[in-house]
Image (cartoon, grey):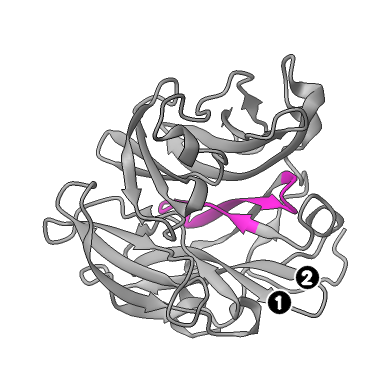
Amino acid sequence: MLLQGYKTLLRRHPRNPIIRPGDFPGEYGEYVDAVFNCGQTMLGETTVLLLSVLLRNNPVPRIHVAESDDGVEFRIRPEPFIIQHPDEPFRSLDTWPIDTRVTRIGDEYYIVRPGSQNVAFLHSTRDFKTHKFIDIVALPGNRVPCLFPEKIDDWYWRLDRPAQGRANQGEIWISRSPDLLHWGHHRFLLDGFNDWCETKIGPTPPIRTERGWLVIIHGVSHNCSNYRYCIGAVLLDLDDPGRITGRMNGYLLCPDTIYEHLGRVPDVVFTCGAIADLTTRSLRVYYGAADTCIGLAEGDLDAVIDACLEKR
């Protein structure tokens, strides 16, 4: 049930929340406190989510794979896909494995996730059954860099999210690399620009469309009692991704249901990505609701791009 009934371009799926803590299978199912903030991609015709999972009897979260043939009914693998790194010096920087961003480049899926002190860990996989840890690819303060899915002018590109920016808040920057490991040419891109995202903003992996790179973002506002997380969108130039060509002034989705208001962290809708179908012109956004469960919001891809270009 919508509490306020805000009109937005993304529509919640009627089955929401589509994944709850009680849906978790296996011996740990009864101990799951939260299933939230998932990386998302397509593996062939299968929708794959990388769930952030928190157990009430374990202070360190883990990441589990969930798969679906229809994008709504998910099979959750009870065994973890990514856990805390077992070896030093990485282990001491890996006490909170959550919030994965997934980007496919060629046949490889690259997974970026935050570590302690907001360093960024990089992994890769081809099948989401096994993964390879590559390295730490960002200094503390760059919480979760988001990779572009292809080279531009022979460079890899990514969107960065420094935790402390020029205005002492989370901002979006852009950088490039010859090899995915060594990053430079850092440039400021965007900071909070409206009431719903004035405190901080953050990116997700860009989606290539014919009209530009579509980037779904989160924005945070602070009121007299707490923080509020919403979801918005930005459009970047295809050939020069450091140039913003469109930006929604409003939000795509904001907390407006019981399961988004009540949970471990109230008043939160937070996404780590989006899935676009360029044939059906549809957009799916799987998001964490109150850091407790997973929701699905859907919309028209071109309507979102139009809203960016028209600054709605």
Compared with residue 133, is residue 289 higher up or lower down, i.e. above or below?
A: below
Q: Secondary structure at mark 1?
A: strand
- Residue 284 x, y percent position in the rendering: 56, 52
**Amino acid type, callout 2:** Asn
Q: Nearer the viewer, residue 110 or 183?
A: 183
Residue 196 image-quadrant placement = bottom right
**Amino acid type, callout 1:** His
Compared with residue 284, is residue 191 higher up or lower down, i.e. above or below?
A: below
Residue 98 badge:
none
Whether label 2 touches label 1, CB < 8 Å: yes
Compared with residue 49, is residue 287 higher up or lower down, i.e. above or below?
A: below
Residue 7 image-quadrant placement = bottom right
- The range drawn in magenta is 270-293
Q: Is residue 272 magenta?
A: yes
Query: Dot 1 corresponds to which residue?
Result: 222
Q: Nearer the viewer, residue 94 or 299?
A: 94
Which residue: 43% across, 81% down?
A: 166
Residue 226 badge:
2
Q: Is residue 186 magenta?
A: no
Q: Which residue occupies the extreme top position in the image?
A: 27
Q: Quadrant of the C terminus?
A: bottom right
Which residue: 74% across, 14% down?
A: 27
Which residue: 41% across, 54% down?
A: 278
- Residue 304 x, y percent position in the rendering: 52, 70
| Residue 68 seen in the figure | no
Residue 183 image-quadrant placement = bottom left
Q: Secondary structure at mark 2?
A: loop
Q: Residues within 10 Å of mark 2 (few under 14, many from 20)?
A: few
Q: Is residue 301 left or right of residue 124?
A: right
| Residue 207 seen in the figure | yes
